[in-house]
Image: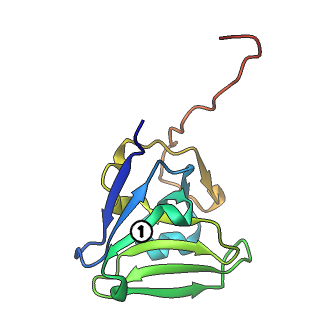
Amino acid sequence: MATKTYDGNCLCGGVAWQIQGEPFTYVICHCVNCKKSGGGPFQANAFFKPQNVNVIKGKDLVKDYVDGDTKSGNAITRSFCSNCGSSLFISPAAGGITIVHSANIKGSEAWVPRKEFFGHDKCNWLGEIKFQPKKVAIVGML
């Protein structure tokens, strides 16, 4: 079976990328920094292995901001388009993960979040979010 490929781009189209495969997790983040960088009440973040995210256009437009003032205490790099300001990627300092702002991925509307981060910072007017059900393995069942 072929691996699904997703296309993504920023608002102006100056930066474009392709992603191989499904996210290994998909979360809603309510931290203040994600809300500020995404310009909304939360940010929907899709987690991929870095080697599965390939910028195919506009690498020169991608700029980085090192966000050292995080609730986790760990610095992250937030990448954005220098032309339109779109939030693109988040890379933890520890490496091994590329987090993509899912609003910029074609086809991400079908994904269902698995959990939320920093729920204590959730806007009080937001209702309950329906998460992907947890898979339960039953030993001995086929």
Q: Is residue 63 left or right of residue 58?
A: right
Residue 138, x across and y down, in percent:
73, 17
Residue extending furthest toward the right: 139
Q: Position of residue 58 (x, y in %)?
A: 30, 81
Badge 1 density bin: few <14, some 14–19, many ≥20, Cα 10 Å = some
Dividing the picture into quarters, in which one does residue 137 lie? top right
- Read off the residue under disc 1: 54
In the displayed structure, 2 sits above or below 85; it is above
Residue 133 versus residue 89 in the image, above or below: above
Q: Amino acid at mark 1?
A: Asn
Q: Residue at coordinates 36% horizontally, 60% vertically from top-left? A: 103
**Residue at image coords 47%, 53%:** 125
Residue 78, how many percent across, how many down? 51, 79
Residue in front for this viewpoint, 117 or 79 = 79
Q: Residue at x 56, y 58 (%)?
A: 122
Image quadrant holding the C terminus, namely top right
Q: Indicate whether 9 appears above or below 66.
A: above
On the rendered structure, is 116 left or right of 44? Answer: right
